[in-house]
Amino acid sequence: MRSFGAIKSIPETAVPEGWSLKPLKQIVRKVSKKSKNKTNVVALENIESWTGKLVPTEADFDGDGISFKEDDILFGKLRPYLAKAYLARSDGEAIGDLWVLRPNDSCEPRFVAYQLLSQVFIETLNASTNGAKMPRAEWAFAGALTSPTPAKSVQTTIADYLDCETGRIDGLIENKTRFIALLKEKRAAVIDHAVTKGIDRNVEMKSSGVEWIGDIPAHWDAPRIATLFREAFRKPDPDLPVLSVSIHNGVSDGELSDEERDRKVALSEDRTKYQGVEPGDLVYNMMRAWQGAFGAVAVSGLVSPAYVVARPIAEFRTKFLEHLLHTKSAAEEIRRYSRGIADFRMRLYWEYFRDIRVCLPPLEEQDEILSHIDRETARIEGLIEKTERSIALLKEKRAALITAAVTGKIDVRAAA
């Protein structure tokens, strides 16, 4: 695709002939009119990064908002690297860290929204912020940023082109995202069937006598947790790593990273407050057990005193039970045994967990099933990773296309 033609050089940047550099404050006006209404509330969390799509939430928002009108642009000033810019489709109220920007009559609102989502604008604005955890952009700086701006008719042509091209790319991303969701469902189904029905399709079945499990192979058992584990309270070794329990990944096999400490836990300097764990132990987070926060321990380490540690008292593979306890039907059973008046207060105490019944094949078959799960999930996860890389490339292409179009690096008039 050709460029717009001759480039006119100026000290700071270069713009196509017929375009001009304009500061943002000459393209839009920042609106500050307060409103107590809540007719169509939009907050930062409602705006999808880099796409400008509106994401509905059920959150209630307090405080006054800023009135906006159709074709106003809502831009997130908090953490501008998130690139949150929404072109309003109707009137409403902006809540929180959002600027309400009203394009001038000489500008095409869609083009301006794309300008604000260009990589060069986001990177420049983000570089101006201060603060590590809550960086905010200042309007005095943003308003002075210059952007290449063509005549309104050209803006409309570029916006039409980008609407079409980004829509096509978004469609591809949506299809690939659905494919990933199907792969994750397939992975869950593979594990669920393997740990409750086995991998021999011709095996004779019997009733487990446990409602949430249903029928199991005739040679399997359905023991209570209390016959497999005993609650453990091991003295901690301060030299061992602090491990965490994840809903999706079980127990970590190494020390928490600095990022995980900031995001998940406040790591105590006194490691004597932790519990010791050994390979084969089962660990769960009492408050998130109903969400699947169980894991088999693979290395010696330390865990939070808020976790329950169960030590095996029989011969079996704890990893098998980790997979079983991550199934959807197990989550429902665990929720039934948990105690609390609301989801965020639900706790699974050992005295209740020990009474839950599970299904268990002979030891040799446990190993066969675990190997089967490893093979099948590795294949599925490979497809997921490949698809995720494809999505990342499409997102990069989308962002680069917007930047090239709104800065005049490509001439879209022939394609539009």
Image (cartoon, helix red, strand yellow):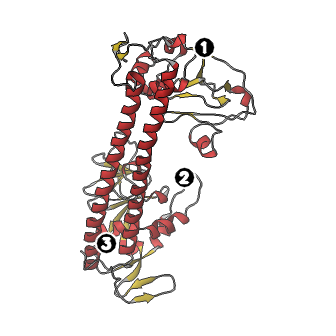
Callout 1 amino acid? Ile
- Dot 1 or dot 2: first in sequence order is 2
Quarter of the figure with residue 183: top left
Residue under label 3, please give it.
Answer: 104
Residue under label 1, please give it.
Answer: 313
Q: Is residue 380 left or right of residue 37?
A: right
Image coordinates for residue 374, horizontal then vertical, percent: 48, 36
Name above or below for residue 83 compared with residue 326. Answer: below
- Dot 3 or dot 2: first in sequence order is 3
Image coordinates for residue 56, horizontal then vertical, percent: 32, 45
Mark 1 or 3, closer to the camera = 1
Graded by Cα atoms within 10 Å as few (under 14), some (14 to 19) or many (20 or more), the crowding at tag 3 reads some
- Under tag 1, what secondary structure? loop
Image coordinates for residue 351, horizontal then vertical, percent: 53, 11
Quarter of the figure with residue 324: top left
Callout 2 amino acid? Met
Question: Is residue 95 something that shows in the picture?
Answer: yes
Q: CA distance from mark 1 to mark 2?
A: 49 Å
Callout 3 amino acid? Asn
Name above or below for residue 191 compared with residue 23. Answer: above
Question: Is residue 288 something that shows in the picture?
Answer: no
In this view, the residue in front, 58 or 407, is: 407
